[in-house]
Amino acid sequence: MHMNTGELKSHKHDPISLLEIVSMEGRYYMARFYLDGVGYVLTDTHDHVVMFTGACAVRDFFHDYQVAKTEVIPPTGTDEMIGMPVTSSETMRVPL
């Protein structure tokens, strides 16, 4: 699911249980957050995913919200290798 920045403002006082800062090819970051157990990707008013230039920019955007836990999900080097078998390995998560 997704939620745009305007809709998110209406949840200013609702606790965000987890904010995931997902690295996209190590250059841009998107925000995935959980309200009442439902996950959302942050979008703009045109339903395009909001891309941040750094993990700190995501954290700064959510500064005025009640975020219980924040994790950065970095890219996995093997994700880009052609012909690599699909594995069920756990995604690395770095607390922030």
Image (cartoon, rainbow, N blue to C red):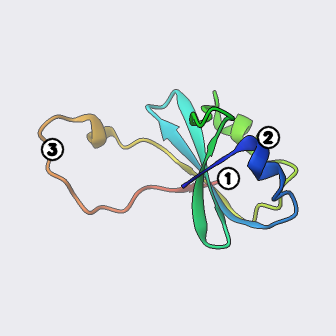
The numbered mark at residue 96 is: 1
Pointer 3: residues within 10 angstroms few (<14), some, or many (20+)?
Answer: few
Cβ atoms at labels 3 and 2 below 8 Å apart: no
The three-letter code of the residue at mark 3 reads Met
Cβ atoms at labels 1 and 3 below 8 Å apart: no
Judged from the image, the secondary structure of the residue bearing numbered disc 3 is: loop
Return the x and y of residue 63 as percentages of the image width and height.
84, 48
Taking the spot 51% from the left edge, 39% from the top edge, the residue there is 23
Say above or below: 20 vs 37: above
Return the x and y of residue 15 as percentages of the image width and height.
79, 67
Q: Of marks 3 and 2, which one's residue comes earlier in the chain?
A: 2
The three-letter code of the residue at mark 2 reads Asp
Q: CA distance from mark 1 to mark 3?
A: 30 Å
Return the x and y of residue 50 as percentages of the image width and height.
62, 34
The three-letter code of the residue at mark 1 reads Leu
Say above or below: 28 vs 38: above
Tell me where residue 28 sits by quadrant: top right
Which part of the image, by quadrant, shows the N terminus? bottom right
Q: CA distance from mark 2 to mark 1?
A: 12 Å
Pointer 2: residues within 10 angstroms few (<14), some, or many (20+)?
Answer: few
Residue linked to disc 2: 60
Tell me where residue 68 sits by quadrant: bottom right
The numbered mark at residue 84 is: 3
Q: Nearer the viewer, mark 1 or mark 3?
A: 3
